[in-house]
Amino acid sequence: MKPAPFTRHVPRTVDEVVSALAEFAPLDGRILAGGQSLVPIMAFRMARPAHLIDINEVEGLDRLAVDGDYLSIGARVRHGAFHKPVIDGPLGKLLAFVVSHIAHYPIRMRGTFCGSLAHADPASEWCLVAATLDAQLVVKSVRGDRIVDVTDFLEGIMSTSLAEDEFLAEARLPLLPDDTKFGFYEFSRRAGDFAMSAALVTYRLVDGVITDACVGIGGAEDRARRIPEAENVLNGQAPSPELFVAAGEAAATAIEPLEDAQTTAEYRRDLVRAVTRRALERSTQ
Amino acid sequence: MTVHTKGSGTTWVGRSIRRLEDPSLVTGRGRFTADLPATHWVRFVRSSVAAGTIEKVSAPEGAGIVTARDLTKLKPIRPMLSKFNYVAVGQPILADGVVRFTGESIAAVYAPSKDKAEDIADQVEVEIAEGTPLIDSMDALADNAPLVHADTKHNVIVEGRIATPGFEDIWKTAHQVLRVEARSRRQNATPMEARAGHAAYDSATGRVTLTCTTQMPHLTRTAVCDILGIPESELRVVAPDVGGGFGQKMSLAPEYVLLVWLARKLSSSVAWTEDRRENLIASFHSRDQHVQLEGAFDAKGKLLALRGDIVANIGAYSCFPTTCGVEPLMALAELPGPYDVRAYDCRSRGVMTNTCPMAPYRGVSRPVITFVLERLMDKAAAAFGIEPTELRRRNLIDKFPYTSATGLVFDDGSYKETMEMAIKAIDLDAFRKRQKTARDAGRYLGIGIATFSERTGYGSPAFAARGMEITPGFETVYLTIDPSGFVEARIGSSPHGQGLRTSLAQIIADEIGIDPEFIKVVHGDTDRAPYGWGTFASRSLVLSGGASLLAAQKIRAKLLKMASHLLEAAPEDITLQSGSAHVIGTDRSVTIASMARAAYHQAHIFKGEIEPGLTETGTYDPSGTFSNACHVAIVEVDIETGRVEMEKFLVAEDAGLIINPMIADGQVHGGVAQGIGNALLEEIIYDETGNILTSTLADFLPPTTHEIPEIELHHIETLTGNSITKAKGLGEGGAIGAPAAVISAINDALSPFGVSIDEMPATPQRIRAALRNSGKLPNTLPSTGRLA
Ligand SMILES: Cc1cc2nc3c(=O)[nH]c(=O)nc-3n(C[C@H](O)[C@H](O)[C@H](O)COP(=O)(O)OP(=O)(O)OC[C@H]3O[C@@H](n4cnc5c(N)ncnc54)[C@H](O)[C@@H]3O)c2cc1C
């Protein structure tokens, strides 16, 4: 459980990060953020980067602030930063509720929000949050900056549209209107384990009916995403137990379930049905 | 039966004094094998395939590497049983041409640091012509199955059968026959500290000191020396602080043999620290059993006869010293459990496969057979339409000594009493009401009961019955009061975290009148401790405790004799207390410390009537004793996801006289936690190619504090004549009863669906699949608030 040999680089500025990436990415170089995903797989020698570009000393990347109508989350912002609501309103509460489901306390004090997105584990809670809330991602390289929609960013199991020389400098989450309702529910074998399925829902009630429904599912498919079929069931309807059951059914039917030695497609659909309905029920509590 | 309630508190025995071993452990000053510095670090190159022949092993230029070719003078590990159709098979220290399981060591490389050793191991290329692996025991039994070892028939390495006379006649009188087919999946004991070894060659004496994390230092010495062909005086084995073992560290690790060989070859120190992945794939596994059980009952629900067929998947090799017979033969002898049944017919086989070898794990077979037998009893209760506790009441043994159908003799116990105590403490009637209300609201609560016996502290006669070439049993203690008046007890047992230093000190303290803090228990060093068997089978307190008591009684007699000389009083008039000998009813006394000094430095004053020095030996080799307990689990099953939430766990337990209640409770807590993991979470999974899918603690899931509910404990202390300290063992009971209780509770919760969960662990996937197949899932679903 010792990683293969590597060289560690410690840039101080974002410019130094991107030039280091430009230089070392072709030589099997990678970003090291919180290290909570990368270091374990290096210890198993499933990853053997020759160079690590450690961003933990880069100035400014710990910025967590509201810019206009979104929340900016810099690449050094740790999961633990969200333990208490970072802003007033539903978004701060939502993030504080979700974060407690990520791993365990010590891991949350190191792992980063952007690292979770870059790592793109299908069960990552932050990927689910980003997908459900239509996050935008600020990607930098020596070739220039680009802003990417989350749907174009998450590509599959541990796979994103980041080019090898690109750095995810910041994630932007749109602020939620004050009357937004949200609910989150996840299913895992033990407390702190990766979710076997999770659902995040947000919507507003206008004249007693649901509008702007966003239903995100994580852990069930190769990436977290919104499920329009479930949203269509909800929009324009008054919340009710029956409606929530129907939305759960729609989500369970719509997904392309991940399967493994223990988990059949059928079981994954069972979970999606349950977590969707339960997230919706929580949104009313 | 005598029920004894704890004494007045004037003795050390019976008090929850703090563990003497803890100050160093909780302040980071414990001494573990992996802390030792070494000149060379070893990394094993392990097979990535389950079956095949090795065609080529090539290492980078100049690398330090050992393969089987270097070890031709070493004997294989070849444990032996003289009974039960046992076929002796050998395990080479490094795979010799053939690999038989994923993770088997093919080569060992060494380098000046752990990292470098791993880098080199990474570059070793191994070419293997893959064979067809056998993973499941049922496949291995098939007619045309390949053989893991050529000498076996159908891969059966051991086979036992017990059939009581006239079985069929009794079977025919049955009013009702019930049947269970159960599967206990494979597990890993997962001690907090994985294995580690350090071998240092001493150029002055030519001796090697092997420090390793073992439960059996003396047996390790014997085994390593036999394999290398060297006298035992050439090897010292030290087990320093050991971070749990649970049986995994009682079997010989071939890795340790390699370390000693290499230290001698290099005339240097070499070390290996196992990582968690190696531990999960290649240390030892356990529990992999398939059991079919039928019970014949009379019209009143009394069990008349039991018929069983047990298949234990024992993996690719047989473990030393117990042999792989330990699982199937324990199951064969103890399957009837605490129930009175006169007719018994059972066959039990150990079957070889291309999987990691099996070793004993806390409870050894009994977690499995208790689970299966309790499933049968629950099914019978349902068939007779009575409470599961009522069915047990009609069948539990209550007259002692009781000789079982398999010839085991049960000493005094409290099988019924602990169950009644548990029923009362949990308030079964109130629970049934609560269960009904919850069910009406669409929530599924269940209660599960497990009653069982735990055979503990058995000496050599019990092991001899298995025909073991190496027959464990006795324990010896050397007890010394040195000239400074401090006490040292050198013991052959080798605790791995269970507080034995404290418990033994309490037993000795009462006898010799010296407080426990002045009594040091020395263990885990073959140069210092008497030859002993180490720690396993809930034996250490009974056997080392008994030997300590015997030695302490001799010291006491000698002290009284000395005091009688010095105080000029009859020994009967003298007491030993708080470090002094007192003449009762007078103010005349002498300190034990001054008597100790006199024993060595003023021996002449005893005029040749008392031998100089103050050392006595106690050896104890009893027939064994049975502890018993009743476990109760309350669970809630989430029928939508199959998830089981533990609400409460209760244990009413009887392990005879409790020496230190806090330590005893800790043993039960730990065992129950492992049992809950056994029932719900832990499973080693192989794919069909023999690759392990659960090689990290993200995939193999021991329970965490979140998954363990409050555990409530109650004790009865039945004093047995089978243990001179009156203490019975209780190291394994927690792990034996808990799986059965949890599975029973799940089945109780799911009774409206008519499903039967007969497989451990009862994962959410399995539970949900069973529910789906029942076709009885309701349309209306419970609200989540309470389940969240
Ligand atoms: C026991 C355990 C349990 C866990 N449970 C959960 C869980 O329940 N839910 C969950 O979501 N996560 C869980 N994690 C993972 C944890 O949240 C990680 O912190 C997170 O996935 C990655 O963030 P990091 O900052 O640690 O990234 P690192 O480990 O440093 O990096 C991960 C990958 O992303 C790349 N990377 C990181 N940052 C950037 C960037 N800014 N730009 C480009 N590439 C980048 C790295 O090069 C690397 O390939 C768990 C981890 C452990 C050890």
Image (cartoon, rainbow, N blue to C red):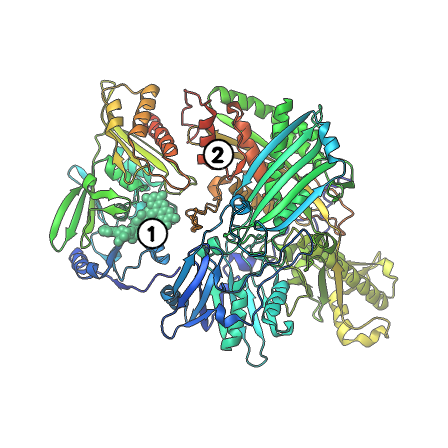
Confirm or reject: label 1 Cβ below 8 Å from ligand 1. yes
* Chain of the residue under label 1: A
Q: Residue visible at 71% across and 71% down?
A: B483
Name the residue furthest left.
A144
Residue drawn at x 32%, y 23% is A244
Q: What is the three-letter code of the residue carrying label 2? A: Glu
Along the viewing direction, whichever of A73 and B670 lies nearer the viewer: B670
Q: Is residue B295 visible?
A: yes
In which quarter of the view is residue B118 placed?
bottom left
Q: Quadrant of residue B471?
A: bottom right
Q: Which quadrant is the N terminus of chain B positioned in?
A: top right
Q: Chain of mark 2?
A: B
User: Residue B662, image x and y in percent?
Assistant: 62, 47
Q: Is residue B513 visible?
A: no
Of residue B590 and residue B429, the one placed in the foreground of this image is B429
Q: Callout 1 environment at 10 Å: few (<14), some (14 to 19), or many (20+)?
A: some
**Pick the front one: B777 or B307:** B307
Q: Amino acid at mark 1?
A: Gln
Q: Can you identify the residue that label 1 sits on?
A: A36
Q: Position of residue B198 (x, y in %)?
A: 51, 68
Q: Which mark is residue B645?
A: 2
Which image quarter is the C terminus of chain B in?
Answer: top left
Q: Is residue A17 above or below residue B768?
A: below
Horizontal side of B377 relative to B277 (left or right) equals right
Q: Considering depth in this image, is A134 or B206 the residue closer to the camera? A: B206
